[in-house]
Image (tube, coloured by chain):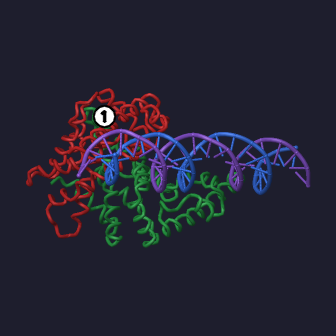
Chain colours: A red, B green, C purple, D blue
DNA sequence: GGTGATGCTGACACTCAGTGCCAGTAAGTC
DNA sequence: GACTTACTGGCACTGAGTGTCAGCATCACC
């Protein structure tokens, strides 16, 4: 506990502080216009050290997203086995978005994300990782059909659920956060799963 | 025709030739391991000129994809107005994949694409552009509900259709092209639109 | 057939992201 | 106090992508 304890606490604090400083710069000057040198200088660390805390500039904004995939997997595992897959997935995605968070700041971050191609791309990459994280559990919950396409079905359903999340996020941002994300997500699920 | 004719014909030929050379290098050494200097040297042009033909290295592989979005939009516009939206979208996506193409080569390219994060990300970006291209027409084809969520519904349905295409492509690649893409795409649509 | 506008080309220099390496140093162990 | 461990800054490097400029081929016009 001793060695691990202090090092990792210090590390967490450093990540927190660098993120804070960097996000301020992003919101002030824009994501692309802010260089890593700017961030390092503002945070009082060297360029080299920055890359010991973050793999890429995008990770500052999307940092927690990777862990969320595993959290989603764990939440899905707690759902009752008989529950329809769409209901389970909707519940999982709803659960992820439980942060009270500063509304205005979140909106600005979202706008930056949807408006910055490199950020958008990394965001999508993280969601692809979520799909990989969740696939086995979704696969397990679908009935066997014996036609060899069970993997495809699981993949498609999962990809759809996450597409709904992205769509809801996009519209939430376009509407400047006026409509609750939960409502948008539910409506997206309904639109897709009610065959019309 | 004169001025435009020759320049643009030369340009097209150059793009064709550079692509050819570059794809060979990619398939031989891998995408990431091939630098733009390698490509330029092999194609007998300068580094600088390469960037006059392609914006990024990824564009070599994904070059035609941007135009496909507009083609998809045009195909969708030809579908009868009464047709259910899912049927229309399935038809559109089926139509895009009409190339006979060298099967082995296509498979290798697909494997490279799904195995290279930066390529995968750009690929998804192009699909996001398709969504933007198709959205108005999908929006037009959906019934008005008056609840202000028509945009969200159109976005979600479109994102889902493209998620199905991605899923089908992924499974097609994993199965080494043994199952026809059309079959996978149809199965993905069925899995998603039949509420279970 | 010469002339000037247009547009492609290579060369050079530059910015920025990201990585490898190394020496210095602070913290934790015995 | 000696030893290990792990963070740190500095330096050099690769690789993508951009701006600039001078040289040269092409085309339209006279």
Near-viewer residue (B30 or B73): B30
Near-viewer residue (B126 or A92): A92
Return the x and y of residue B155 as percentages of the image width and height.
Answer: 32, 43
| Quadrant housing residue D20 | top right
Q: Residue at x 38, y 35 (%)?
A: A18
Return the x and y of residue B130 as percentages of the image width and height.
Answer: 41, 49
Return the x and y of residue A38 as percentages of the image width and height.
Answer: 48, 34
Q: Residue at x 46, y 69 (%)?
A: B101
Whether residue B86 sits left or right of residue A34 in the image: it is: left
Return the x and y of residue B56 as percentages of the image width and height.
Answer: 53, 52
Q: Chain of mark 1?
A: A
Which residue position is annotated with label 1? Answer: A172
Is residue A117 visible in the rendered image? The answer is no
Q: Residue at x 35, y 48 (%)?
A: A124
Instruction: Answer above or below: position of C30 versus B177.
Output: above
Near-viewer residue (A182 or A104): A104
């Amino acid at each position: 506990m001793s060695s691990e304890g202090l090092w990792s606490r210090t590390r967490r604090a450093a990540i927190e502080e660098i993120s804070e400083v960097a996000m301020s710069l992003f919101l002030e000057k824009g994501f692309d216009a802010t260089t890593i040198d700017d961030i390092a200088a503002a945070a009082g660390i060297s360029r080299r050290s920055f890359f010991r805390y973050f793999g890429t500039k995008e990770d500052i904004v999307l940092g927690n997203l990777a862990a969320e995939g595993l959290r989603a997997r764990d939440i899905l595992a707690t759902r009752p086995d008989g529950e329809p897959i769409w209901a389970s997935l909707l519940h999982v995605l709803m659960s992820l978005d439980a942060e009270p968070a500063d509304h205005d700041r979140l909106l600005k971050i979202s706008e930056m994300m949807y408006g910055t191609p490199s950020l958008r791309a990394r965001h999508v990459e993280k969601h692809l990782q979520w799909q990989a994280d969740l696939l086995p559990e979704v696969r397990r919950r679908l009935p066997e059909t014996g036609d060899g396409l069970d993997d495809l079905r699981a993949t498609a359903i999962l990809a759809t659920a996450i597409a709904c999340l992205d769509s809801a996020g996009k519209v939430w941002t376009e509407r400047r956060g006026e409509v609750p994300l939960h409502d948008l997500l539910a409506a997206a699920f309904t639109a897709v799963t009610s065959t019309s």
